[in-house]
Amino acid sequence: MGLSLATAERWVERWELQQQRYAIDREDRFTVIADVVQHITAGHPGRPLVVDLGCGPGSLAARLARRLPDADIVAVDQDPLLLELARTHHADAARYVDAVIGQPGWTKALGLDRPLDAAVSTTALHYLSPDALHRVYRQLAELLRPGGVFVNGDHFPQGDTVLAGVAGCVGRRRAERRHVFAHEDWASWWTAVAADPELADLLAERRNRLPASATDSMGGLALPAHLWLLRQAGFGHVGPVWQYGDSCVVVAIR
């Protein structure tokens, strides 16, 4: 038996709030990602095809669907609980796929019928190792049409340790001014989820399937390393288009 819509709405709303603690100016970041996708797909024939990597409960997919109502959006994640929240609360935003990004066969699981116009992600790929990230970047370059784009919004530390400290300070001060630390954090959200009997089966499946490194890691490569890996993967135009502190939107055009 699936989740009730009321339950999904409640937990997605709480998710949206707690994520503001981690993604500086999160709504602006979403808007910039949508701006880039709309720009790249404008004037291109046919329905835009977009994949959302690490879609979670459908936050980015839902916003893209509102901005690009003619787009076909495929949203992929490995977390069964978050996927069920997305399927229930944002049922019409995307076609949702249960797959592990970077593992053998994950691109076939997407069931794509044509080259991608865009691949997007936000606060989702930082748990991948450098080797896995390079592999995923190469795979995305192969899936995208010429002129297609990969847009990634995430935490990208500066390569210079002194600048990284300054960027971290800027981000924290911005977050404090927005009062986002008044919201519950990641751990508190999951603790509350565990107390909801309607989510018990999904939570048990999640615990069985996901290693800890894929559920709570906030590590990540520095921005210059990402840009280098993207160029090595075959993207011709690579760079950040928006940044606040270490929160950044990186664009890579095939």
Image (cartoon, rainbow, N blue to C red):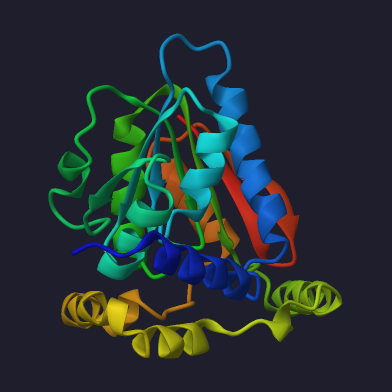
Q: Single out the residue that lies furthest toward the left.
A: 105
* Residue 37 found in image quarter: top right
Vertical side of 244 occupied by 197: above or below: below
Q: Which residue is located at x 48 percent, y 88 percent? A: 187
Question: Would residue 3 be visible to someone looking at this image?
Answer: yes
The percent position of residue 178, horizontal first and vertical second, equals 81, 72
Query: Residue at position x 65%, y 56% from top?
Result: 248
| Number of residue marks | 0
Residue 114, placed above or below residue 195: above
Task: Write the residue at 30% across / 69% down.
Answer: 81
- Please, is residue 229 above or below residue 176 in the view? above
Taking the image as shown, residue 151 lies to the left or right of residue 211, namely right
Looking at the image, residue 128 sits to the left or right of residue 33; the answer is left
- Quadrant containing the N terminus is bottom left
Residue 184 sits in quarter: bottom right
Q: Nearer the viewer, residue 7 or 143?
A: 7
Query: From where the camera sits, is residue 54 visible?
Result: no
Could you say where residue 68 lies in the image, as x and y percent from the top left?
Answer: 54, 29
| x then y, percent, for residue 254 | 45, 29
- Quarter assignment of residue 166: bottom right
Spot occupied by residue 177 in the image (x, y as percentages of width and height): 86, 75
Instruction: Between residue 133 and residue 23, name the one nearer to us.
Output: 23
